[in-house]
Amino acid sequence: MFSEFKKNQFLAVIAAVSLLTVAPVHAANNSLAVQTDSPVNNSLVQNTGANESFQEGLNFAAQQNAASAEAAFRRVIQIDPNFAEAYANLGSILANQNKLAEALPNFQTAIRLKPNVPEFHYMLGQVLYAQNNMADAVESVKKARDLFKSQGKTQEANSLEQIIKDMRK
């Protein structure tokens, strides 16, 4: 089970991931999206629905309404199965409910879709750590640290360095 410290770390990362949202595509900006059946325009409408549901999920998560947040992120994934942030946020919601086995594949999918997002690797590492899979947990957090370094985010990388040291204790 997550200690209160780990749970708070997870919630902080949810906030960081929420900053990674894709810009919503509004149907009003493309009147053809509403008027035609072309596949491109339908995908714009589809992405608008995914973005709206994603924002709902973030709002529910901020209100600590886990059941509604989970449902919203699952809707996003149904609408757009390539929405990496939805998988990561769903994984966080599940992990915070101690549903670690269910959270794990969501983080793995988020990483498969967007491998250069350090927060995803960090969250995966936290789940692996909670499952007592120390070696893989450390490797995942190291990957997050290295990605932060390569992106010039030294403060975040240094924070993860300390977490890696703590994980090895």
Image (cartoon, rainbow, N blue to C red):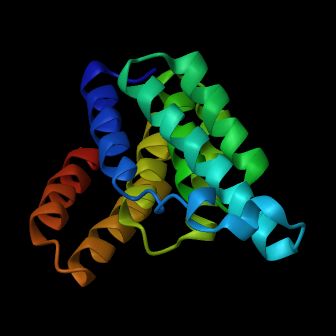
| The one of 62 and 89 positioned closer to us in this rendering | 62
In the rendered structure, the answer to whether residue 49 lies left or right of residue 166 reads: right
- As drawn, which residue projects farthest toward the right? 37
49 shown above or below 95: below
Instruction: Determine the image quadrant of residue 110.
Output: bottom right
Depth check: give the residue in front, 135 or 75.
75
Q: Residue at x 33, y 33 (%)?
A: 11
User: Which residue shows up at 72% across the image and 57% down it?
Assistant: 45
Q: Position of residue 118 (x, y in %)?
A: 37, 65
Name the residue at the bottom extreme.
150
Looking at the image, residue 140 sits to the left or right of residue 37; the answer is left
The mark tally for this picture is: 0
Q: Residue 114: image x %, image y %?
A: 54, 70
- The answer to which of 66 and 116 lies nearer the viewer is 66
- Residue 68 placement (x, y as % from top left): 58, 20
Q: Quadrant of residue 109?
A: bottom right
Q: Residue at x 55, y 27 (%)?
A: 69
Q: Along the horizontal axis of the image, is 30 left or right of 149?
A: right
Residue 133 to residue 63: above or below:
below
Measured as percent of width and height from the top left, residue 112 is found at 63, 68
Does any portion of residue 66 appear in the rendered image?
Answer: yes
Q: Is residue 132 visible?
A: no
Q: Is residue 130 above or below residue 166?
A: above
Q: Nearer the viewer, residue 113 or 53?
A: 53
Residue shown at 14%/54% (left/top)? 162
Please state, as top left, top right, bottom left or bottom right, where the C terminus lies in the image.
top left
